Image (tube, rainbow, N blue to C red):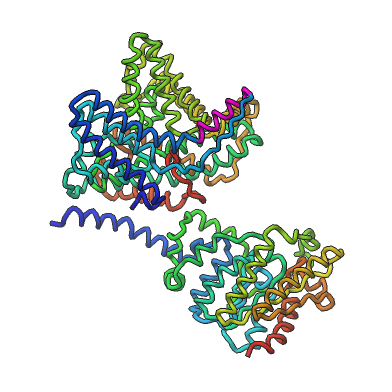
Amino acid sequence: MFYGWWDWRFLFLLAGSSLLNYYLGILIAGAKSEKRRNFLIWTGLLQGLGSLLFFKYFNFFIASLTAALLKFNIRLDVYTLNIILPLGISFYTFKTISYLLDIKKGKIEPSRDWVVFFGYVAFFPTVTSGPIDRPGALIPQLKKQRVFNYSQASDGMRQILLGLFKKIVIADNCAAFTTEIFSNYKTLPASSLLFGAFLFTMQIYTDFSGYSDIAIGISNLLGFKVTRNFDSPFFAQNIADFWRRWHITLTTWLTDYVFTPLSIYFRNYGKMGTILAILINFTLIGIWHGANFTFLLFGFLHGCYYIPLILRGTFGKKKKVIAGTGSKFSIGEIINVILTFLLVMFTFVIFRADTLTQAFDYYRRLFSVTIFTMPVITETVNTAVVLLAVILLFWAEWQQRGKQHILQIDFIKAFPVRALIYFGLILLILSFSATKNADFIYFKF
Amino acid sequence: MKSPFKIFFSKLLLFIIPVLILFEVLFRLGFYPIITNSTLFDTKMLAIQRQHIKKIDLLSIGSSITLYDLNSDIIVKNFNKPYYNLGSWGLQITDMRALLQSFVKEYHPKYVILCSSFTDFISPSNDTYANYINTDFWVKNNFPEAFYFKDYHSIHQIVRRKYKAYPLNFDKWGGAALKFTLKDIVWNKWNEHGIFPTKYSNCNYSDLDSLSTFLHQQHIKFIFIQAPIKKSYANTVLSKQIIQSHFDKCRSITESHGGTYLSYYKTDVFTDNYFIDQYHLQGTGAEVLTRLVVEDLKKIIF
């Protein structure tokens, strides 16, 4: 019902894909030969990736091919189709693929209960925008009889509140500014463009992590534990550290099913092999977001950021958590955090731009003398609210690092104090929600 | 021992109830919910709710022309019938068409008066009125606080609207008078020539047709009043032709569905001193117009 509310026609795709993968799972587990198992796996991959390619990339491919051929004076009269992207297709396709591959590897048993399996694919809190949960984690929970768990449910409510705060107070208010700035970037000073890049970075983080918080919170209310998707990514000290904290379920999915097999495949080429594997992996992360060269370049650039780490041999080493568990941090750590943030922020300009030309033009205007002027701010109250809310969020993330989310404040023993914090957030949400509510950014992926 | 679910639910209520109380307090303090993007329309709807108006025999609808050009006192004194002026700034014919669906159902009028100028035919419809139209009458009348949640606007926006709004003064029948002295005249508006017709005019004409048909089907008498325009507006042959063509269209549409068309484009009666700009009459001008209108309406309204 939840999925059909958006567009009932795509229920058939979701149900058809679930049905096929349900039977494929059972057949793969019962297959006697490797050849048959591979055939069944490829059938599943073909269906999943085929739908994804068709719905998400068909028009992009045709348009790019036509444009490329036109450069050689070859005119190709192929019409693009009016295709609507089914909600959450990138997310549930990855779920079905990991299900089949995990069965093949013997990591999990196929589900013999179709209700459970359909529930796994279309698990409503996460079906639209993740987190992309693995079958090994979610299917056993779906099989169990659920009992109301007070502490889990109240933790869920807290996380929903946090998600709403991030989305409504920060992301939606940022969206109002970034839409304005990116639409009129040609007439604005560089300082406004820098401010726009900063705000978009905040917007995408709070929008997507806010959504994840709400999804995880609802799952908790229903008695399910869903994998965390963000872990204070802007405290990362290098790009590898950033991706271990940003969209965690997508990164780990691609690490397990793309990067690791590729690394093994290229192992004879040493560091060059690792670089190649990481570039492919990150280019895929980029185009997973959508059919646009901007996303492709975004992913590729992030792959390039890894090269110094691979060459220095520090790529696989987990960076120590900033300041450890104490509260003091070194100057070096702070510089690392700022540099990583800046690198990420500049790539988000490409992510936000409609075309590569627009992104490059934005960069060109960004690096000009007007960077030393005051940015143009029209809505002073909303700007102040956004900036204060961002500071509050990062302060809380810093204080609460190591916890699942920042509202896990059970260490405050006095209930009235905790209640005051919750009411404070509720009041901020009610008082400063944006004039226009923007859709969740990741809904379109 | 209470069950964990009951404890959870009770604690949840502990957070929900203060939020509801907060909005009730806001309402009582006059920070009303944002229903549409017209402050005047919202305030008027809440005023009707507070006055417990259930029936309006003589209902006038329109833009600021209806609001300012019809003097409520004169109408009420001359017709012993429940009357209300639902005129609101910026309403276009397409909006009136949509709103009348609700108003007819809610207030069962016998006569609908539209005092109009061509400024009612220049813009597209305002989608925000849908929030009012699509809300149940019972909710509008008994629980307008529901609008806080129906189309959510932040408290910050609500507070800002209250303090930034243009002063809203209307009488208990919804009408208002513009009291301007010479120094209040905005001179660039005094001789302003707005663009007419626009690309939205045809759509508004077609909605005037639909509005007349609808009222005719409901057995409600529709009276179209062509409001005066300042003499200097029609200072060229082209502008004379444009307004004449507009008058002809309005007359033809209104009369084809059994409505009454009354024109008060009388430049000899409505001289410049009655206006505050090209289209709006000030208080004394409104009185003169309303007296003339009342004389004509006495032949129609019994």
Which image quadrant is residue B251 in?
Answer: bottom right
**Relative to A114, B117 lies left or right:** right
Residue A139 spot, x, y in % from top left: 22, 39
Most distant residue in the bottom direction: B302
Residue B43 spot, x, y in % from top left: 55, 68
- In magenta, the rendered stretch is A59-72
Q: Which of B254/B177 is in front?
A: B254
Q: Is residue A60 magenta?
A: yes
Q: Quadrant of the C terminus of chain A?
A: top left
In the figure, A192 relative to B220: above or below? above
The reply to whether residue B162 is visible in this rendering is no
User: What secondary structure characterizes most of the magenta part?
Assistant: helix
The reply to whether residue B81 is visible in this rendering is yes
Q: Which of B251/A225 is in front?
A: B251
Residue A415 spot, x, y in % from top left: 26, 49
Which image quadrant is residue B204 in?
Answer: bottom right
Q: Which of A165/B163 is in front?
A: A165
In the figure, B203 relative to B175: above or below? above
Q: Is residue B218 magenta?
A: no
Q: Residue at x 39, y 23 (%)?
A: A281
Residue A282 spot, x, y in % from top left: 42, 24
Most distant residue in the left direction: B1
